[in-house]
Amino acid sequence: MGEDTLKQIAYLAAALKAPRIARTAARLADQARAGGWSHEDYLAAVLDREVAARNASGAQLRIRAAGFPAPKTVEEFVFDHQPGIRREDLAPLLAGHYLAEARNVVLLGPPGTGKTHLAIALGVAACHTGHRVLFGTASQWIDRLHRAHTQDRLAAELAKLKRYGLIIVDEVGYLPFEQNAANLFFQLVSSRYEHASLILTSNLPFARWGEVFGDQTVAAAMIDRVVHHAEVHTLKGASYRLKHLGTDTLPSVAITKQTN
Ligand code: ADP
Ligand code: MG
């Protein structure tokens, strides 16, 4: 390719805010000439590199902004250890169809069964499919909403959150909510209903959410909205954290045995 043409491409790529095109254009032109590509094939290859690079860097930005507590992926998840969910169940969720339909995902199950791991893995997948994601524990979400409420900007905060395609609320039920917190949480759930997705995880079955929200009516209204368009998976079995101790062995039990 002529010097002048390359300079012009660099200038045009900068104007398009796609400086990578300037770098790939010359390299791919050599490949194209050697491989006898058509003009269309060459243009498609250049644009394809740009789009792939943009998607990847966008996904990395979204992953960093999401606030995941640890990097977890579905590849690291050992399905053989978790009878409550199959790889085939997860595949459509990873593809993100539920996000387009503003449906929710609820992961229930005892501690250590992989709820947080899968919630993060789904969040990461959502970032890759172009969605903005925010992760927090139920208490972190309550703190955030409470702060907004006391500063008289709850409505603005909820409106801002609605622009996130996915909000993950981890650990619903570890701590009971006060009345005010339960109301704030209810508003978060209502504001997203049929607009944008939620992933909730809980160690408690729905029947016990009344204890968490301190009020059966609020809990019932919440569950109604969450579950109306939701996929619920119940994870089972012994904690993965304790698996080296053998099935169903809790540390306290092991200690008691040792001291006897
Ligand atoms: P939960 O949120 O249900 O209490 P976590 O998702 O935090 O459980 O899992 C506890 C730890 O065990 C995490 O480090 C997680 O990555 C790991 N873990 C849980 N289940 C599996 C699994 N089936 N395969 C691989 N790692 C798992
Ligand atoms: Mg967890």
Image (cartoon, rainbow, N blue to C red):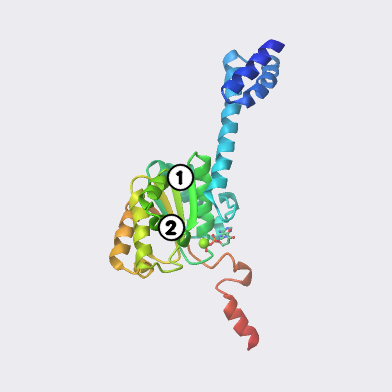
Question: Is 159 positioned to the left or the right of 48 in the image?
Answer: left
Residue 6: horizontal and vertical position, in percent? 68, 15
- Front residue (pair 3, 250): 3
Instruction: Report, in whole angstroms, how far the alpha carbon at label 2 lies from the one at label 1.
Output: 36 Å
Residue 142 vs residue 22, the one in the foreground: 142
Q: Is residue 249 above or below residue 86?
A: below
Towards the viewer: 150 or 84: 150
| Mark 1, secondary structure of its residue | helix
Residue 259 image-quadrant placement: bottom right
**What's the residue type where badge 2 is placed?**
Arg
> How packed is label 1: few (under 14 Cα within 10 Å), some, or many (20 or more)?
few
Residue at the bottom extreme of this rendering = 260
Packing grade of label 2 (10 A; few <14, some 14-19, many >=20) is some
| Rendered residue at 69%/19% (across/down) | 26
Query: What is the quadrant of the N terminus in the image?
Result: top right
Point out the residue furthest to the front here: 151
* Residue 234 appears in view: no
Q: As displayed, is residue 219 above or below residue 89? A: below
How far across and down, in percent of the image, does residue 213 sit? 36, 66
Q: Secondary structure at mark 2?
A: helix
User: Disc 1 marks which amino acid?
Assistant: Pro
Q: Which residue is mark 1?
A: 92
Q: Residue at x 60, y 32 (%)?
A: 53
On-image quarter of the C terminus = bottom right
Q: Residue at x 50, y 49 (%)?
A: 122
Query: Which label sits on residue 147?
Result: 2
- The answer to which of marks 2 and 1 sits earlier in the sequence is 1
Q: Position of residue 183 (x, y in %)?
A: 34, 61
